[in-house]
Amino acid sequence: MAVDNFTIFSKGGLVLWSHNEVDLVGNPINSLVKNILMEERGGENSYNIESYALKWVFANEFGIIFVAVYQRLLQMFYIDKLLELVKDRFLEIFKNLPPHKRDLPLDDKYFLPRYQEIISEIMQTKNRSQNVPRTFEETQKGSEISKSKKKKNKKKKSQDQDTKLIIKEDEELASEEDSGKEEEAEVEADTQNNKEGEVEVEAKPIPTKILPKAPGPRPKFVKRSSTKTVLSGPALLSNSKKSASLATVQTTKPTKVARVWDDKPLSKNEAVSLEKSFSTSGQAYPEKEEDLDRSSLTFEKIDQLDESSPEELETPEGPSVASRFSSWFSNLTNRTLTAEDLQPVLAQFKEHLIAKNVASEIAEKLCESVLVNLQGQTLNSFSRIRTLVQTSLAAALERILTPSKNIEILRDVKAVNEREDRPFTIVFVGVNGVGKSTNLAKVCYWLQENGNKVSIVACDTFRSGAIEQLQVHSKRLNVPLYNRGYGKDPAGVAKEGIRLAKDRGDNVVLIDTAGRMQDNLPLMQALAKLVQVNNPDLIVFVGEALVGNDAVDQLTKYNKSLIDLCSSNRVIDGIILTKFDTIDDKVGAALSMVYTTGSPILFLGTGQHYNSLKKMNVNAVVNALLR
């Protein structure tokens, strides 16, 4: 397996173990840390830089990262398996180390043999898979077809069972209806005979003792006929073993007498009616279970009697006090966070960020990165998942908005003036109507206040009125303005203006350009030519704080055009965010622009005055995003 390098390091930057198969050109792992991990892009699967491809996994419970570096031209199908195996074997050793040795690099004699053993296992698996052709079921298409067949069979089996059950129930109902009709016919015949005095019916007492509840599922009751009959009066038949009361059939339902609840003593008739020790025939209920006549029960099937006490039967459904206390106590203990625990909370934060004007793609990537960083961590007692996620998200937002490259314009101006004896050049670019000329004038005022000689070059030779707008600003600020009129080549105008500024001894040259949409190829080619010919020290993108998803598209295509059309591979160096005073707390555009380019926000435009230009407060933006 051609893995050029495998490195294990902590999130604090300590290399715990590293092994090189070949010497690396450059330092791709440092680039990974700087451009991916520190920019909260850890949710991505891989990272390509020059001729290398990098993949990694996290062990968040110990704050460790495992990185494999290999040639990007190679198809390494076993890298994911290698990373997981190395992670498992290394943690087996790391867990048993005393705390004071966990901050020290691991010696090769402890882990290198295990690493080589893992490589051998993977190579053997690879060779076996290459020698033995895969069956159709082992292929991706075969597995999908197999899963589909299983689902269809399972669905069909379920439908067949439902059909059989419905047929069975229909047959039972039909048989019950037939039996009910027969019973009705018999009752009608008996009634007619009783009226004529020819037939007598023996009415046996039906034991009505309530049986205890049977365990398991509740028995199914048989549906009876809707016809109701009541036996009353003496019957006409007698039994040799015991005397029975005679009853005649009546079709009228007896009226129910309301019971009176008061403190008066009961009358004799009331006491007799409340006596339940005897049946309606005057016979006592059987004392033993064997004496019960089970044929009178209306259950289809009784397997066994329930031995539960009445108190248990009357307990309402739901967890008992003991189970609820046990569940509450178990929540106090530490537990390892899983993706299922974090995803609902992160989904809420994603929607919150989108509502704050963060591009949906950026919000999703940011939440994925937080998920990767928190998955596997241990949640302490009395801690809430939402609080942990919010803390981690706030730290991620702060890292993104804090510039990875520090741009100090005043320091750089002085360095260029002294070292190269020429003016420091800044080009302002952006789409139409975002306020490039206005914010160029604000930057000019800020530079003058810091003791610099500034000149302006009007390279917007496309928009009508652009030169006149700059003439007004140059008169108010008392700075020279160079222009050649409309319809001229912007690259040539800029070059001539820089030459004149150098002759005057100016410290800074500010170059205004025409507003152009990111999809306008001719204007993007003209901008790339201006950058290619003049090679400015700073390319500043001016964008609105009001944009959402469009900010990502604008910056991505501007950078792509500059890279593709300029041989020097220039990109956006910094951002000025305008109209920041009009958005209240919807500051998501700042996050979207910084995350897309990795370039810092230099200034925020906060009004219509020359001094309405401020530095961005990272903590204030983070608080506004999470508020």
Image (cartoon, helix red, strand yellow):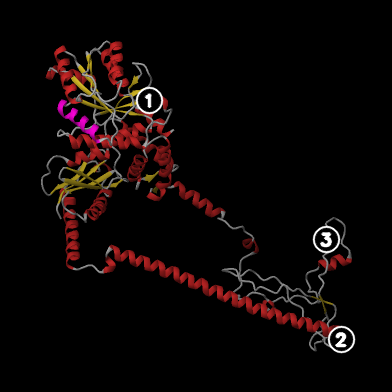
Give how far across and how far down residue 169 sits, in percent.
59, 74
In this view, 35 is above or below 321: above
Which quadrant is the N terminus positioned in?
bottom left
For image coordinates 85% across by 78% down, the residue present is: 233
Which quadrant is the C terminus positioned in?
top left
The answer to whether residue 290 of the structure is visible from this angle is no
Q: Earlier in the sequence, mark 1 or mark 2?
A: 2
Identified by mark 2, the residue type is Gly
Using the rendered view, name the quadrant where residue 8 is placed: top left
In this view, 445 is above or below 250: above
Label 1: which residue? 579
Identified by mark 3, the residue type is Arg
In this view, 522 is above or below 335: above
Q: Which residues are magenta?
A: 521-534
Give how far across and how far down residue 470 sits, in percent.
28, 17
Q: Are marks 1 and 2 in contact (CB under 8 Å)?
A: no
Using the rendered view, name the quadrant where residue 183 is placed: bottom right
Label 3: which residue? 259
Residue 326 relative to residue 438: left or right: right
- Crowding at dot 3, Cα within 10 Å, few <14 / some 14-19 / many 20+, comes out as few
In this view, 491 is above or below 116: above
Mark 2 residue element: loop
Q: Earlier in the sequence, mark 3 or mark 2?
A: 2
